[in-house]
Amino acid sequence: MDIVVSGIRSTGNLHLGNYFGALKNFVKMQNENKCFFFIADYHSLTTHPTPKELHSIVKNVLVEYLASGIDPEISTIYIQSNVPEVTELYFLLNINAYLGELERCTSFKEKARSLPNNINAGLLTYPVLMAADILIHKANKVPVGKDQEQHLEMTRQFGNRFNRMYNCQYFTEPVAYNFGEALIKIPGLDGNGKMGKSEGEGNAIFLSDPPDVIRKKVMRAVTDSGPKVMNQPKPEIIENLFTILNAVSTPDTVEHFDALYNNCQIRYSDLKKQLAEDIIAYTEPIRNRINEISKDDEYLRKVVNMGTEKARESASKTVREVRQIMGFRDF
Ligand code: TYM
């Protein structure tokens, strides 16, 4: 059986990008594989949440994972910081991760550019912690969006380097997993690249957004003055709306608006109205479950305890074996 590891940083509520990038087809995913879903709260520390907000953000992500349909009886769902074996493996991998390759990592360069006063070592070694998350369960499939491709490549590099260094075939190579489809990038609504938790106001649609907020955000999405020549490729900001429409609407609806676009008859306000209603319908069951589950602290405590136990069982086996390979012995 294949082993799947999927992680989400706890820096805010889950949005449509997280959902379609990492959680889509989760029912199939968790029934066909051994799945570990976790909340990367250590990763979120690299941008320094306050002690006051840390717990509530972790709770939100936990609730939204469960509301998306992850079944804690079938899958293992846990919080990264509850599994100390991950940080042990992180250190053991760190000694074979080199400054040059970490500095060349695109996400590090972007963060260093946007937060020049906070280029901390955790940010630099972020990909090593991510590799530890994946290798700790010896996962071979990792459902991620396009933005995590490079991190995954680095994970393969660290695992292979460990194998070479200690002359063993211990770690397998994890690959990105999207049910045979290309990795996706859900764009933001503001015309600025990808949908993200920390992008500007109005960029992201969150799973917890109420219908009126979704309508407002979608109606404000950036568009242009419309096509003037028939059957032309769409500019990026328009293509973005179609990408989201494709994710949440029926093929007929997409075809309908595509044809209007190609005939230069499209009215963006109609497209946006339809898109907003389809997002609302798609997310409604999730929203309802978020409201129910977030009130049930006892259930959440049970889920976390169960997940910690299952995750530690798998993680401690790996760390024990890795230590042995590296030459640690009991007295
Ligand atoms: P994070 O928290 O930024 O995003 C979580 C998951 O959602 C995907 N994603 C997207 N997919 C498509 N379009 C988007 N606009 C979009 N935005 C986010 C991400 O690709 C990711 O799959 N470093 C990771 C967290 C992590 C992790 C791991 C993931 C830590 N350890 C181990 C997998 C395995 C991150 O910051 O994701």
Image (cartoon, rainbow, N blue to C red):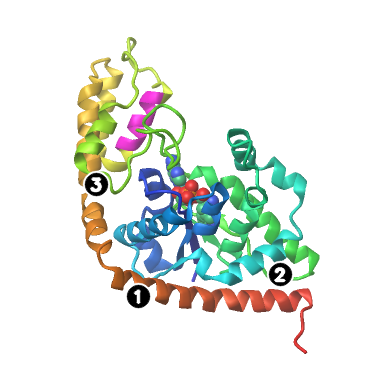
Which three-letter amino acid code belongs to the residue tagged 1? Lys
Q: Regarding mark 2 in the picture, which secondary structure is present there?
A: loop
Which label number is shown at residue 63?
none
- Could you tell me what secondary structure mostly forms the magenta stretch? helix
In-front residue for pair 45/149: 45
What range is drawn magenta here?
Answer: 237-245
Q: Nearer the viewer, mark 3 or mark 1?
A: 1
Mark closer to the chain start, 3 or 1 = 3
112 over 14 or under it: above or below: above
Ligand 1 lies under 8 Å from the Cβ of mark 2: no
- Mark 2 to mark 3 CA distance (whole Å): 44 Å
Q: Is residue 213 left or right of residue 235?
A: left
* Horizontal arrangement in the rendering, residue 291 relative to residue 96 (left or right): left
- Figure quadrant of the C terminus: bottom right
Decide which of tag 1 and tag 2 comes sooner along the chain.
Answer: 2
- Residue at 28% x, 42% y is 248
Task: Estimate the spatial distance between the alpha carbons at disc 1 and disc 2, rounded to whole Å.
Answer: 37 Å
User: Of the residues tagged 1 and 2, which is closer to the observer?
Assistant: 1
Is residue 239 part of the magenta span, yes or no?
yes
Q: What type is the residue that disc 3 sits on?
A: Tyr
Disc number placed over residue 302 in the picture, else none: 1
Residue that sits furthest to the top in the current view: 228
* Residue type beneath disc 2: Gln
List the residue tagged with mark 2. Answer: 169
Q: Is residue 180 visible?
A: no
Image coords of residue 259 (percent x, y)? 26, 24
Q: Is residue 17 left or right of residue 281?
A: right
Residue at mark 3: 282
Q: Position of residue 90 (x, y in %)?
A: 65, 63
Q: Is any part of residue 58 visible from this angle?
A: yes
